[in-house]
Amino acid sequence: MAIAKKPRTMNWRYNSSLAGRLVLWCAALSVLLLVPVVQNHAQTQAAMNAQARTDFERADADLNKTYQAVLKKLPDAESKQKLKETQRAWIASRDAEATRAADEVRGGSMAPTLRYETMTELTRQRIKQLETRLTSNAAPDEKDASTPSPKPTATSSASAQESDKEPAARNPNSVSPDKQWEYKCAEYAPGEGAPEIVKADTTEVVVDLDQDLTVSGKDAKETEVIWAPDSKRFACNYSPVHAHHTVFQSVAFYQLRGDKWVALHSPVDEGTERLQLAQFGKGHLPKDFNARRCAPDRDVLKVRKWTDANTAILYAPCYGRTSNELEAGFLFTLKFDDAGKWKIVDTHRISRKELEEEEQ
């Protein structure tokens, strides 16, 4: 007689163990599948902003080459001057359009990318305009230099028309005495900008202060450039990244060597927590003055002026650690040699009357 075989059943312990292994295996597979996605997203917004800036710089370099070629080809001074004025107006119009594009994200982290992408697109369009005139042996017309908006919006139409009529006025103090260089802080969002030194009447960046000095956000708009009388050096008063509840202002020096600007030795070390006045004034402060009495959350060191091509005057105040009021202030005279090395040659303690004037 045939004996019916008992159906095989899986032990519940084994079944549970297998189910657990399956869950772990599926989880591991999911992680493996997600690795490429994570790697793709590893490109942070900062990296995207940097790439957008690089793309613009390439386009801008191409524009400058084309512009110079057209300028060289023009027959007389009058037509060259007309092209220069047209180019200035176009730059102002393009920058205004890029600012409006960045404003669409209300100062978000994507603002720099939108700004540079807009500038790149408009710059490429301008190159085509100039190339057409270059090949047709004619000077660019004023109407050809108007900046088309890549993404026109109803809210920006009126302001775009206004910017096309007249270029933005330049701050005379931003231009070097020899008219060869200019300080700009292109706004990419309301109240936020990217400080840089460019060749005058161009957008060719020669010193990227935004990258060099880690200046960003609203503090970038407070950056100030003070030119030496011979245009061979400049001081940059700036506010690097710092805690929002504090005040921190410092200074950097640059010198022209050949056709390139190079950073000089910094007066202070930002990496230390010591007050700038204590660092910079070491060995030059009065013996009866103790820098430890100064509030560390109001740390200021900045250039006031150049008295000649090799001499700069720096100002350093001391706000009371407990009173938080201006209690002392010093003016340091710096002397530079040909190599750009500096030394303090004089220290002046500001009088009480001068301090009161500072507070006004």
Image (tube, rainbow, N blue to C red):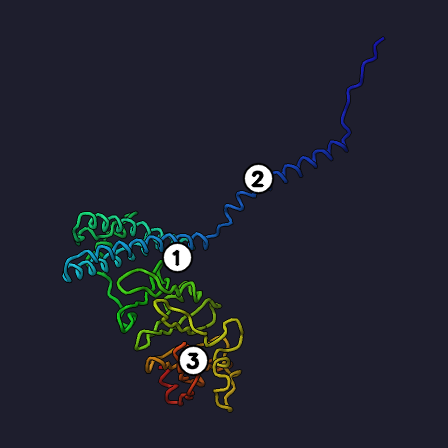
Residue 337 placement, left or right of 142: right
In front: label 1 or label 3: 3
- Between the C-alphas of marks 1 and 3, the distance is 39 Å
* Rendered view: 178 above or below 16: below
Residue visible at 37% across and 65% down in the picture? 207
Q: Of helix, strand and loop, which one carries label 2?
A: helix
Q: Nearer the viewer, residue 249 or 281?
A: 281
Q: Are marks 2 and 3 in contact (CB under 8 Å)?
A: no
Residue visible at 67% across and 35% down in the picture? 22
- Other-residue count near label 3 (Cα within 10 Å), few / some / many at <14 / 14–19 / ≥20: some
Between disc 1 and disc 3, whose residue precedes? 1
The quadrant of the picture occupied by the C terminus is bottom left
The quadrant of the picture occupied by the N terminus is top right
Q: Amino acid at mark 3?
A: Trp
Which residue is disc 2 drawn over? 33
Q: Quadrant of residue 112?
A: bottom left
Q: Are marks 1 and 3 in contact (CB under 8 Å)?
A: no
- Between the C-alphas of marks 2 and 3, the distance is 58 Å
Q: Residue furthest top?
A: 1
Res. 342 mark: 3
Between disc 2 and disc 3, whose residue precedes? 2
Res. 107 mark: 1
Q: Of helix, strand and loop, which one carries label 3?
A: strand
Q: Nearer the viewer, residue 30 or 333?
A: 333
* Rendered view: 212 above or below 336: above
